[in-house]
Image: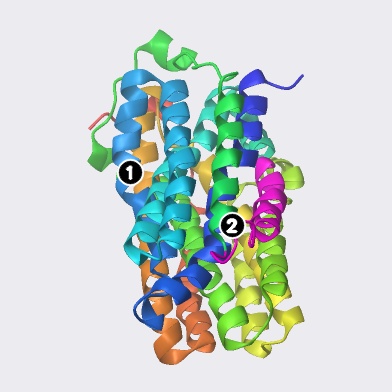
Amino acid sequence: MLNRNVVSLTLAQSFAMTGPAISVLLGGIVGNTLAPSPQWATLPVALMVIGGALTIIPAARLMQAVGRKLAFISAAGIGVSSGLIAAYGITSEVFAIFCLACFLIGVNNAFVQQYRFAAAESVPSEGASKAISFMMLGGIVAAYIGPEVATLLVNSLGKHLYAGSFVGLSVLMIGAILSLLFYQNTLPDKLARVENLPARKTGALVRQPLFITAVAASTVASGMMGLIMTVTPVSMHVHSGFSVGDTATVIQSHIIAMFLPSLVSGYLVARFGVFRMMIAGALSMAACIGFALWDSNFLNYWTALILLGVGWNFLFISGTTALTQTHRDSEKYTVQAINDTCIFGFQALTALSAGAIMGAFGWDVVQWACLPFILILMVGVAYTSRIKPVPITKLATK
């Protein structure tokens, strides 16, 4: 029987993830039109990531104070506003306003990223990977309706191309709000309540090898995806001359590849373990780089971005699952805030530098820049897999 919260979060994910999907597809293209210089074309996408990075800690504190449900719904309201602000920025041809809108999309996305933790908390610990995996299937729906709505409404507001696409985003975000009305805040973990386990200090949390590896897996996955995906629309549409439709197809396929493996990845993590799935994810990302360097035709773009999405899925779900094994209920907001700050912070750095690297050195250098991080991650996973884990109940408090 499906858990009510997991279903609610899956539906909300279906609508809420259209924000990043539409922003990634159109942010660089609109930026290339409105920005004072082509080197600033990807700034809106970078600001979306930065908005998420800066919001992680305030989001965790807000959820701790008022509960996840009210926080999620309030953030979705910001998502509704962001689409309208983006449309206004395009129609008024003010780059700064469009950048503000993308920043606000990132603010909402910081809360959306917490959906996976809310899903894991809604089921027994042994079902966490499956709950996370199922919930993320909402991304498949978002991958389809996001780009579809964006391309369908490109010309809906006359000469102001893409403004209608962001109005469509606002409508989709209302769907997220309606879905979240069915979510119920969860009670503290029974084990933590019965044994009255105290929260450890932050230093004790971040020194755990499994914690470091879990955070690294999700961080590298998101950072590399952010770097490559951010410049793909610019590389395809602006530099290689592919149509917006072709570019949308590649981005749409990429986002589907990010979430479609969730049909099986939760079961694969349960069957093979988090470390083997992390290695599989890293190898998929390495293969993405290989195809991206091979040629700049449509098929290679498409294949590379699919492999990038699959690699992200394996790393992200295995990393998130591993993270749930490193903290007590009393520590969850601290651990989750640290984890997502690292993810968004690194993704912001890569997204912010993507345009400059692309403009100065080209598509190939973007790919080579990713390879060292993937190799370092694989070494770290191999090392941590040899360490016998210590049960949460036996960990030292200091």
Q: Work out which quarter of the rendered image holds the C terminus and state it.
A: top left
Q: Residues within 10 Å of mark 1 (few under 14, many from 20)?
A: many
Q: Nearer the viewer, mark 2 or mark 1?
A: 2
Q: Position of residue 310 (x, y in %)?
A: 67, 60
On whether residue 142 falls in the magenta region, the answer is yes
* Boundaries of the magenta span: 137-161
**Who is closer to the viewer here, 201 or 314?**
314
Which secondary structure dominates the residues rendered in magenta?
A: helix
The relative height of residue 245 versus residue 381 in the rendered view (above or below) is below
The residue that disc 2 covers is 157
Q: Is 186 placed left or right of 311 in the picture?
A: left
Name the residue furthest top: 194
Residue 165 picture location, percent across and down: 59, 55
Secondary-structure class at tag 1: helix
Nearer to me, 122 or 124: 122
Q: Residue at x 68, y 81 (%)?
A: 242
Which amino acid does the dot numbered 1 rest on?
A: Thr
